[in-house]
Amino acid sequence: FIGYGGVFSNESFSFDINLKIKDAIEKIYKTRLRRIKVFPRQIFTNSNFIHQTTQYTAVVPIKETMSEQEKNIHKKTRTAIRYAFKHNILVRKLKEIDLDVFYCIYTETMSRVHSDYFTPKNFFRDLIGMENVLFLGVFIDTKLIAASVFFYYKDGMYPAMVMDDGTY
């Protein structure tokens, strides 16, 4: 995934394969990547893509049913969820039709954090239809105010990006 300018992978590919993936993405999307992130294990950064850090990321387990998930949610969190529903806050899967507003929020977030890299919009357009990718949006009434992109594989879900409009 080209989150902050890097390749995202849920597999431990060799360094050579990651470089080939990087080259292919750069060619297809006509952009230059600044890092390779082999998720969730390590990151290769700088222009030579030399291994510099090891990073660990939380993996959210996916349960069989929503009721099983709710059993693992803290009581205060369940109360906050009920409060959100009561005040017209909705979380739903984003569709391709939501992509323009999603991308506006994404660029606002990237600007706010002073990122010098922006993932191309057409890359998100390709991702939103993929089988193991989930785009979730948070709406107040009908206005999208925040979004997250998750990758999931087998029984794990990996948070890839989180963004908001800066209002809340």
Image: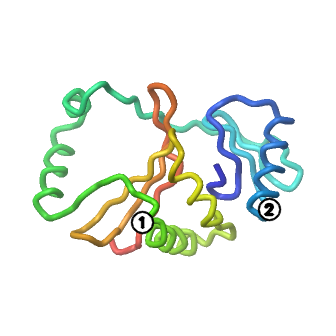
The residue depicted at 13 percent of the width and 51 percent of the height is 82
The residue depicted at 46 percent of the width and 30 percent of the height is 156
Task: Specify which label sits upstream in the sequence, 2 or 1.
Answer: 2
Q: Amino acid at mark 2?
A: Arg
- Residue holding disc 1: 98
- Residue holding disc 2: 32
> How many numbered marks does the figure carry?
2
- Tell me residue 127's x, y (percent): 56, 52
**Mark 2 vs mark 1: in front:** 1
Quadrant in the picture for residue 166: bottom left
- Tell me residue 12's x, y (percent): 70, 29
Task: For the C terminus, give its image quadrant.
Answer: bottom left
Report the disc number at residue 111: none
Task: Please determine whether, in this image, residue 95 is positioned above or below residue 158.
Answer: below
Q: Amino acid at mark 1?
A: Asp
Quadrant in the picture for residue 139: bottom left
Q: Marks 2/1: CA distance?
A: 26 Å
Judged left or right of residue 33, residue 116 is left
- Tell me residue 88's x, y (percent): 16, 64
Q: Residues within 10 Å of mark 1 (few under 14, many from 20)?
A: some
Which residue occupies the extreme left position in the image? 86
Task: Please determine whether, in this image, residue 76 is positioned above or below residue 62.
Answer: below
Residue at disc 2, secondary structure? loop
Task: Please determine whether, in this image, residue 138 is positioned above or below residue 39.
Answer: below
- Tell me residue 49's x, y (percent): 84, 47
Indicate the colouring scheme.
Answer: rainbow
